[in-house]
Image: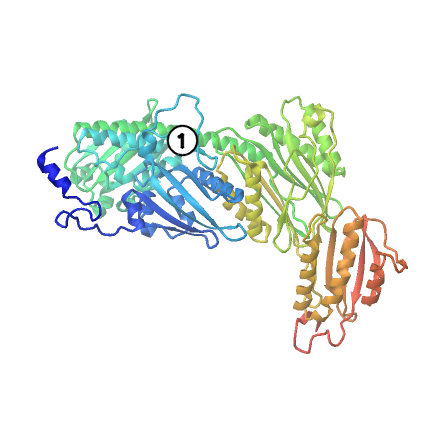
Amino acid sequence: MTEEGRQERDRYDPRVGWPASRRRVPPPEIGTGERLAINGMGSFDWDLDQGVFDLDATGLAVFDLRPEEYDGRPDSLVLRVTPQEGARLDIALRRALLSGKRSYSGYFQITRRDGVKQWIHTQGTILRDASGTAHRVVGIVRDATDELRQLPPRPPGAERGRDSAGQGAGPRPGPRTSSEPAPGRDGRSLSALVRRTTEALSHAVTVDDVTAVLTGSGALERFGADGLILGLLEGGSLRISAVGGEPMAAFRSLAVRRLDDSLPLSEAVLTQQPRFVTSSEELFHRFPLVRPFLERVGLEAAAFLPLVAQARAIGALGLYFRRRERFTREDRETYGALAGVLAQSLQRAILFDQEREFATDLQASMLPRHIPRFDGAEIAVRYHSAWSGREVGGDWYDVVALPRNRVGLVVGDVQGHDTHAAAVMGQLRIALRAYAAEGHPPSTVLARGSQFLAELDTERFATCAYAEVDLATGTVRTVRAGHLGPLIRHTDGRTGWPNVRGGLPLGLATALDLHEFPETRLDLVPGETLVFCTDGLVEERGTDITIGMEALAESVHHGPDRAEELADHLADALWQRWGSNDDVALLILRRAPDPGTRHAPRIHQYVHQADPEGLADARDALRQALTAWGLAGLADDVELAAGELLVNVLLHTEGGAVLTLEVLPEPVRRVRLSVQDRSSVWPRRRSPGEAATSGRGLLMIDALAARWGVEPRGDGKAVWCEFAPTESAAPAAGAGSPAVS
């Protein structure tokens, strides 16, 4: 150390720091948000109750979103996040919420407005209330592309990365292409144009996907053009398939043109040679048809590129420029390479669309064309095909009209994703329909279906669920063969998966000589809904199926009442959520509501034997109904009688009970309470001793009710009792519900 350094060191006093002459002015305070922004981190605050996802300015920049493009709703982020990535993040968050974790994190990809893929890392802290219910998530997002680019490449076959919530982080990405100058500046930017376009097109599957790359956000910036037009060859005509850029909107009116040399795009197709134009007058002289369009927008230079695949022209691409004086040799070579990449992508997409059309037509021909209508029920069906080219699934649904106002509901899935699976599905569907129409009970329908499938001499098996619904009584007899049972939505919106006993899949049951398909009896009261589906709606590879089942139950709970509207709601909410990896069959039956009439209102409610809160819910429903009808004075007696009857059913039978409360019209003008069960044993009045702990239920009902009785109902009975409103219980003139006035 020099002498000056020693003197400087000796001037430092650890008790007071440096002398005043050496002390620095303290830097200005930096807030938490500024600190994050300096490090390229954006923050978010997600209110789970309100569904508001607040993203700061840096967070918007990470997602490449402008403030006016984002409205604070999580769904708005789909502008950048693909459905598959969004579903994976959603599953990770749901797992964290259900497992009670305090935080979660993960990597996912977005597509920037210029088409470049970018990796993002997110980390969030889950805030919970005193009961442990999550109500808020606060966290950060940041660009992680460079970080992942620096990771060493993985050997072939290495497993996908895992995020902290157990979700696959996806393959490690290669280097991200940074924003570069428009083409025509230097060789580096020209090669970047082709590289970025190739990267964007690599994810395109259909022709619509390809046109979306050409006309989507940031496409023109990527090409360095002011306008774009794409024409595809269809027979002897050229169809304008895509137009990009506001100045080019007028070209949409060209639509389909006969293939001749009147348009520069047509000429490029016919000659298979590119044309580069730097003078609008030259263009107008050669192609007078385009003059009115180009004069309106002021475009002067253009490049017309033939799209040639396997020595055959399939279309042409036109790029228009407002200010361009020349096309260099590098420009021409680059745009030629661009046309080659685009042609290959379009050829694959056209082939995919053709194969997809063939597959979906075949699949549709195997499904019922018309769904019969029934008095007393609403039925809706939906079918969603997986986007896998010619790979079609064996999912199906069917609705069978049965005698005595009954209906058979079938959903199933044949093993495999090919045309053979679809063919087997068609034969099995018809066989099951025939067995059901013959009048066989549900267990026999599936047993015969399993034998039929085994005799087809195919190695395929099939899962299936079948239900026979009596629309008059609401009785449901259901069986399943390795398939999901039905989801039920009750009249108050609650949803549940009843415990439906099951057997082995069809075909496999016959091979193992295990043909038992035990029936489960359910009750569907008026206004309740049955939802059947195949596993494609609730299952995604690598995730627990219970997560999807919970998501379906939640969507049904919040969905509309009508069957058709509910089917649309589930399609919008879940098909995009899980992506298109599997076919989905959806079948919904809603028993028509029975509110009675204006002068004789009525409510129904099912009390499940295994539901500990069912009795309390039933009492609340009774009191609310009586209050709404202006008969609150009867609530105590009716609740007490209902409690006795329901407890008797739940304790002494093997099923639940259907509770009905109705106002009988004039001249009787009484309130009738009915409790229906499946037991054939009728109650009898006893004379219990003083020390007896039971046997007083009917005595109590005899004392409370004006009259009571028992009557047969199907294979069970119904115990009913009537209550006459007293003057104090009846509503005053002009007050209460008109139903009892």
Where, quadrant-wise, is the C terminus in this rendering? bottom right
Against 358, residue 25 (above or below) is below
Q: Nearer the viewer, residue 575 or 305?
A: 575
Q: Quadrant of the N terminus?
A: top left
Front-lying residue, 653 or 446: 653
Where 25 sits versus 363, above or below? below
How many marks the image carries: the answer is 1
Q: Residue at x 66, y 77 (%)?
A: 734
Q: Is residue 70 left or right of residue 643?
A: left
Q: Is residue 477 above or below residue 706?
A: above
Q: Quadrant of residue 195?
A: top left
Q: Where does residue 552 sit, x and y in percent of width and height?
A: 56, 44
Q: Mark 1 sits on what residue?
A: 349
- Left or right of 523? Residue 297 is left
At horizontal 77% and vertical 54% (from top left) the residue drawn is: 647
In the image: residue 515, left or right of residue 357 = right
**Residue 357 visible from this viewpoint:** yes
State the image coordinates of residue 46 (x, y, percent, origin top left).
42, 50
Q: Residue farthest to the left?
A: 3
Local packing at callout 1 (Cα closer than 10 Å; few below 14, some 14-19, many 20+) is: some
Instruction: Give the residue at the far bottom of this rendering.
Output: 733
The amino acid at mark 1 is Ala
Residue 272: % across, % down:
28, 27
Q: Position of residue 93 (x, y in %)?
A: 47, 42
Using the rendered view, name the quadrant where residue 318 is placed: top left
Q: Nearer the viewer, residue 38 or 410?
A: 38
Task: Label 1: state its secondary structure.
Answer: helix
